[in-house]
Image (cartoon, helix red, strand yellow):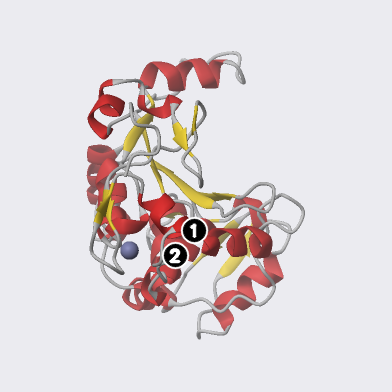
Amino acid sequence: MSPTGDFTTSQMHSRDLHRYTIDGVGRVSTSANVAMEAACPTCGEEFTYVGLHWNRGSCGYPEIPESVEERLIGILMGDGNVESRDGKNGYMRITSVTNEFLEWIKQTCPWLFTEVRVTKTPEQSREYVEDYVEDASDYTFRTIYELKTRSHPYFKHLREKWYPNNEKYFPDALDLTPEMVRMWYAADGYIASGSESLPPTIRADNEMRRPEYLRELFNEHGFDPSVGGGDIRFNGEDRDRFLKWIGDPVPGFEYKWERQSREHYDAKRAEVI
Ligand SMILES: [Zn+2]
């Protein structure tokens, strides 16, 4: 069912996609988020505005599988952001320099996500950075991709838990799982330079004022990382054990798992960014 009659999915494709939003009651507005045809996982039927079906129909909102929730939390620790305003169901927005990663995330739970789209062209990235820095000539500008979830009550819950003062703040009671850390590492991880031992490292800027908290997150799982300046670094025996614990490389960010040599890592990295 199309609540607006004159808007079909194909017409929306041919327009400037990110200018249109379909909210919970089917109103089209001109900000973010785009509704696309999807099958409801509960009844199996296809809907142009599946969110409307969940909001008003008999199925209600489908439950997000626990494995997907773990992944979403890991993404939230990295490049994900959750928006939820005025007590409404929220959604998650994930940005990345590689659409391969976002397409893979989408495939892990197709009904939950809309389409991967370009949010900034290299030229738009340049304009954005030039507003903040005087000389942007040393920067490399890339296409930035974005993936949004559909609205779902789970994201309202995440927003309340992870943004106590409207800024992202990791909850005190956070029990990491390998899958969460795998997503976090894919987003904010890198192999530290300046060290021959090639230690896996996670950049945790927003939590840099809580080094003890960051260390304890991993102490609970038998790791003893060094934490300082917003970096969580896995040295010594932890180096191999850490990558083994989080599991297989993530599509689009395989290079972060490459530790044969600095040259090898750099070469693989250059293929992506
Ligand atoms: Zn249904």
- Quarter of the image where ligand 1 sits: bottom left
Above or below, comparing residue 225 to residue 121 in the picture: below
Please give the residue where the numbered disc 1 appears in the rendered image. Answer: 152
Q: Position of residue 208 (x, y in %)?
A: 67, 56
Above or below, comparing residue 111 to residue 23 in the picture: below
Above or below, comparing residue 216 to residue 75 in the picture: below
Above or below, comparing residue 48 to residue 21 in the picture: below
Amino acid at the residue labelled 1: His
Q: Is residue 227 left or right of residue 186?
A: right
Query: How would you rate the neighbour count of disc 2 (Cα within 10 Å): few for under 14, some for 14-19, many for 20 or more?
Result: many
**Pointers 1 and 2 in contact (CB under 8 A)?**
yes
Task: Specify the quadrant that holds the C terminus.
Answer: top left
Amino acid at the residue labelled 2: Tyr
Q: Is residue 138 visible?
A: no
Q: Earlier in the sequence, mark 1 or mark 2?
A: 2
Query: How would you rate the neighbour count of disc 1 (Cα within 10 Å): few for under 14, some for 14-19, many for 20 or more?
Result: many
Q: Secondary structure at mark 2?
A: loop
The residue located at (45%, 62%) in the rendering is 72
Please give the residue where the numbered disc 2 appears in the rendered image. Answer: 61
Camera-side residue: 260 or 69? 69
Camera-side residue: 229 or 178? 178
